[in-house]
Amino acid sequence: MSRTAAETHIKELGKIFDICAAKDGDSKTMNYNEFEEMINTNFPNIAKGQNLKEMMAKLDKDCSGELDKTEFGKCIGNFIAKC
Ligand SMILES: [Ca+2]
Ligand SMILES: [Ca+2]
């Protein structure tokens, strides 16, 4: 069965994480600089006017200082809720 449009979009979002998180050589987690660049490059309209530091702090559930893919998923979930 070929991939649906929805599945393709989900896959693309995962790819965005992989590409942005890999900037510092560790593609498993996204540090603040990577997060900021990811938002500014990919979600400038949706995230407009938001405090990115606060946003990241809220998403970072395990307080590791970086976002893993699950935490990134919550970020996307928040965006969907706002759309
Ligand atoms: Ca990284
Ligand atoms: Ca984390």
Image (tube, rainbow, N blue to C red):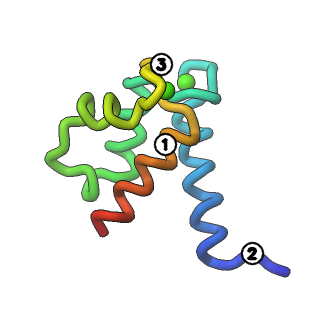
Residue at the image position 38 percent from the left and 46 percent from the top: 41
Q: Amino acid at mark 2?
A: Arg
N-terminal of the pair, mark 1 or mark 3, is 3
Q: Residue 72: which disc?
A: 1
- Looking at the rendered image, the quarter that the C terminus falls into is bottom left
**As rendered, which of 55 and 44 lies closer to the eye?**
55
Q: Which residue is mark 3?
A: 64
Which residue appears farthest toward the left when viewing the image? 49
User: In front of the other: label 1 or label 2?
Assistant: 1
Dot 3: element? loop
**As rendered, which of 68 and 8 lies closer to the eye?**
68
Residue at the image position 19 percent from the left and 43 percent from the top: 50
Rendered location of residue 19, percent (x, y) = 59, 39
User: From mark 1 to mark 2, how far is it between C-alphas?
Assistant: 22 Å
Specify few, some or many for label 2: CA neighbours under 10 Å numbering under 14, 14-19, or 20 or more: few
- Looking at the rendered image, the quarter that the N terminus falls into is bottom right
N-terminal of the pair, mark 2 or mark 3, is 2
Dot 1: element? helix
> Is label 2's Cβ within 8 Å of ligand 1?
no
> Is label 3's Cβ within 8 Å of ligand 2?
yes
Dot 2: element? loop
Residue at the image position 44 percent from the left and 31 percent from the top: 61
Q: Amino acid at mark 3?
A: Ser
Rendered location of residue 31, percent (x, y) = 45, 23
Q: Amino acid at mark 1?
A: Phe
Rendered location of residue 72, percent (x, y) = 49, 42
N-terminal of the pair, mark 1 or mark 2, is 2
Q: Which residue is mark 2?
A: 3
User: From mark 2 to mark 3, how far is it between C-alphas?
Assistant: 34 Å
User: In front of the other: label 1 or label 3?
Assistant: 3
Is 10 located above or below residue 26 in the figure?
Answer: below
